[in-house]
Image (cartoon, rainbow, N blue to C red):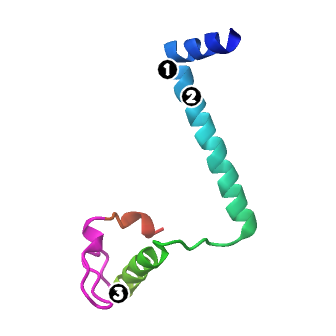
Amino acid sequence: MDVKNNLHNNKSNPRKLNLLYLGLLLFVTLLTTLYLASSKAIFAVSDWTFHAARVEEIYLNLKSGSFFTFIAARTFHNTGAASFLFYPYIFFYP
């Protein structure tokens, strides 16, 4: 009976439920961050080469004096991929 009343109370108060979800998300994020920081490793998955190539292109453009990057002319096998038009690159600068 108490479980049913608690579920009913959470449904009637969406703010409490949202705070519960936010707390759970923050807890899982903290655990994941602590685990990765303690392992001192970068886990490369399927997108790693793509994003590493994007960082390399930004580095090469900054080295040549170009601050903004729109076309990846030197990475991605010199194909001129326009990946920077679809993915924000400003977060890679820091």
Q: Which residue is mark 3?
A: 75
Q: Based on the picture, tell me whether residue 26 belongs to the magenta stretch.
A: no
Residue 9 lies, in percent from the top left, at 57, 12
Relative depth, front residue between 48 and 90: 48
Amino acid beneath label 2: Leu
Give the residue type that dot 3 points to: Thr
* Horizontal arrangement in the rendering, residue 83 relative to residue 31 (left or right): left
Task: Check residue 83 in the rendering and tell me which mark sits there, or answer none.
Answer: none
Q: Residues within 10 Å of mark 1 (few under 14, many from 20)?
A: few
Residue 74 lies within the magenta run: yes
Q: Is residue 81 above or below residue 18?
A: below
Mark 3 and mark 2 in contact? Answer it, CB < 8 Å: no
How far across and how far down the image is residue 12, in percent? 50, 12
Q: Which element is circle 3 on?
A: loop
Q: Which residues are magenta?
A: 64-86
Report helix, strand or loop for mark 2: helix
Disc 3 from disc 2: Cα separation: 43 Å
Q: Earlier in the sequence, mark 3 or mark 2?
A: 2
Viewer-nearest residue: 67 or 54: 54
Residue drawn at x 56%, y 21% as measured from the top left: 16
The one nearer the camera, 41 or 9, is: 9
Left or right placement of residue 17 versus residue 31 in this view: left
